[in-house]
Amino acid sequence: MKLQTNYAARAIENLGYFGGDWQSMMLVRAAPLGEFNEYSVEWVEDDLIYRLNGEEVYRNVGLGPSFPEPLFAALNFAKINASPMTQTWEMEIDWVKHEYWQD
C-alpha cells in the first residue's frame, strides 16, 4: 500500500457560503505519514502558528482578530483529486489536547 506523503495546514475563510476559501491560507508539505508525527496550531497574539514535530512550518500572519467565532480542529484525510478510491485509508490518533485561556 502506498502511503500518502503530504499534509495540509490551513485556516479556512468563511465567505458566507458552504465551503469558503480553502486555498489561500494553506500550506501543503511533505511528511512521513507512516510514522508518528506531532502536529500543532497555536494562536499567538494575532498569528496562527502551525508546527510539525515542534518546528514552525507555516504562519497565518495577522488573522487572529478576523475570526468571528472560536477555532476548531478538523483531523481528517482529504482526497483532493478526481482519481478513484482504490484502497482503505486509516488514521490513528493517539491524543488531542485543546487549551483555552484569557489574559
Image: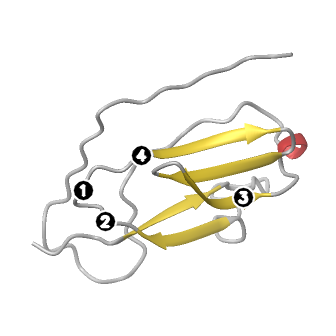
> Is residue 4 shown left or right of residue 103?
left
Read off the residue under disc 1. Answer: 35
Check disc 3 and give the amino acid type: Arg
Gap in angstroms between the C-alphas marked 2 and 1: 6 Å
Q: What label sits on residue 32 in the rendered view?
A: 2
Read off the residue under disc 3. Answer: 59
Read off the residue under disc 4. Answer: 38
Q: Residues within 10 Å of mark 2 (few under 14, many from 20)?
A: few
Check disc 4 and give the amino acid type: Glu
Q: Position of residue 35 (x, y in %)?
A: 24, 56
Gap in angstroms between the C-alphas marked 2 and 4: 11 Å
Seen from this angle, which residue lies furthest bottom? Answer: 83
In terms of secondary structure, where does tag 3 sit? strand
Seen from this angle, which residue lies furthest front? Answer: 55
Identify the residue at image location x=68%, y=20%: 100
- Find out whether the residues at labels 2 and 1 contact each other: C-beta distance under 8 Å: yes
Identify the residue at image location x=25%, y=49%: 91
Name the image quarter holding residue 77: bottom left
Q: Mark 3 or mark 4: which comes first in sequence?
A: 4
Quarter of the image containing the C terminus? top right
Q: Residues within 10 Å of mark 1 (few under 14, many from 20)?
A: few
Image: 103 above or below 4: above
Identify the residue at image location x=64%, y=64%: 22
Check disc 2 and give the amino acid type: Pro
Q: Position of residue 96 (x, y in %)?
A: 42, 30
In terms of secondary structure, where does tag 4 sit? loop
Q: Residues within 10 Å of mark 3 (few under 14, many from 20)?
A: many
Image: 2 above or below 46: below
Q: Mark 2 or mark 3: which comes first in sequence?
A: 2
